[in-house]
Image (cartoon, helix red, strand yellow):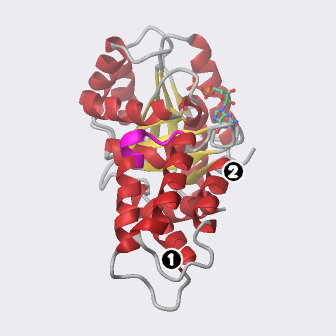
């Protein structure tokens, strides 16, 4: 199923009610606004976001700056489009690179969200940009995680830095930065341990790694399938460790898309990338305007 399929249909029923209408009024937009509200809620957009969104759209719809010569139903489409773009942060938020020395990209996230896969995808992305890259195995609790990263590194053709399961993540990461400096590597991507739920041990460890290496990017990897929860997760991680953005994975799955629409507004942090498949090339920058187009179908 296309992720926004249901949302697109729900929104269409809003403009369809304005077919043949000459001018937009408080009365004739009431029902379409209810349609928009319902469609967003059903797509797992978080409630406060839906409230603000609908109120802003109503206001603009009745505002003076309506466009001459454009049909009222088309005006609503345009207003919703522009509001969706704003909601998702307006502009694309690209990766930030360190001004000097290696760029350190720290990845955080719960278990199973696709963090290790994202490591490899990011390495692939960086290589395409012409940057040299190294992966760092800082998830020391699962030996399988180190093996998985090593195999992925081989697939992408980038080195993987590991000190096995005995060393501590802050020290491993610090040593990896040194190694990257010595070898003139542009960027390192650090895979950290995930847990089934947010817990203090995980947060403390991330804080220690952060303190040890002062990462350029701290990106939270979030599974889009978590729906409503995704925005809350980003908010919590941001308060706890101060993230620079989120990566939304599994957008090719059965998610209804709400996370893509809620994260920025609720957490103040942008979605930087979206993952939409298991292959290395299935990671793309998050473009709010393209995503808004997808929503509108
Ligand atoms: P981690 O525990 O967070 O490191 O998660 P993994 O990287 O091991 O991924 C968990 C599972 O999700 C694996 O089977 C991946 O192939 C799969 N996966 C990761 N990203 C995506 C994605 O964007 N789309 C789909 N369909 N599957 C993904």
Q: Could you tell me which residue is drawn at 50 percent across and 15 percent down? A: 196
In the rendered view, would you say 4 is above or below 293?
Answer: above
Residue to which mark 1 is pinned: 75
Query: Residue 199: x, y in percent?
Result: 36, 14
Marker count (numbered): 2
Q: Does the magenta portion include 45? A: yes
Q: Are marks 2 and 1 in contact (CB under 8 Å)?
A: no
208 lies above or below 103: above
Residue placed furthest toward the front: 27
- Image side of residue 240 versus residue 91, left or right: left
Q: Give the mark nearer the N terminus: 2 vs 1.
A: 2
Relative depth, front residue between 89 and 52: 52
Image quadrant, ligand 1: top right
Left or right placement of residue 213 versus residue 27 in this view: left
Nearest the eye: 92 or 253: 253
- Regarding residue 211, the answer to whether it shows in the image is yes
Magenta stretch encompasses residue 39 = no
Q: Which residues are magenta?
A: 44-50
Residue 5: mark: 2
């Amino acid at each position: 199923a296309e992720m926004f399929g249901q949302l697109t249909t729900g929104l269409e029923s809003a403009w369809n009610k304005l077919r043949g209408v000459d001018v937009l009024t408080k009365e004739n937009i009431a029902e379409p606004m209810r349609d928009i509200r319902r469609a967003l809620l059903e797509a797992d957009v978080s409630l406060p976001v839906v409230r603000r969104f609908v109120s802003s759209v109503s206001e603009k719809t009745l505002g003076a700056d309506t466009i001459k010569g454009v049909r009222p139903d088309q005006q609503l489409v345009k207003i919703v489009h522009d509001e969706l773009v704003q909601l998702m942060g307006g502009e694309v938020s690209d990766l930030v690179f360190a001004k000097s020395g290696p760029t350190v990209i720290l990845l955080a996230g719960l278990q199973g969200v696709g963090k290790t896969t994202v490591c490899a995808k990011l390495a692939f992305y960086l290589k395409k940009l012409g940057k040299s890259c190294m992966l760092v195995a800082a998830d020391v609790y699962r030996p399988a995680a180190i093996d998985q990263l090593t195999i992925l590194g081989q697939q992408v053709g980038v080195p993987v830095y590991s000190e096995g399961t005995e060393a501590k993540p802050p020290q491993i990461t610090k040593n990896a930065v040194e190694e990257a400096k010595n070898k003139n590597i542009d960027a390192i991507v650090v895979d950290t341990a995930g847990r089934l739920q947010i817990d203090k041990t995980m947060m403390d460890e991330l804080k220690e790694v952060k303190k040890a290496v002062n990462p350029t990017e701290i990106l939270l990897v979030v599974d889009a399938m978590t729906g409503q929860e995704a925005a809350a997760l980003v908010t919590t991680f941001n308060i706890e460790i101060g993230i620079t953005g989120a990566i939304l994975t599994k957008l090719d799955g059965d998610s209804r898309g709400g996370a893509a629409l809620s994260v920025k507004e609720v957490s103040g942090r942008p979605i930087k990338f979206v993952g939409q498949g298991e292959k290395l090339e299935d990671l793309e920058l998050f473009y709010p305007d393209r995503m808004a187009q997808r929503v509108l179908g």
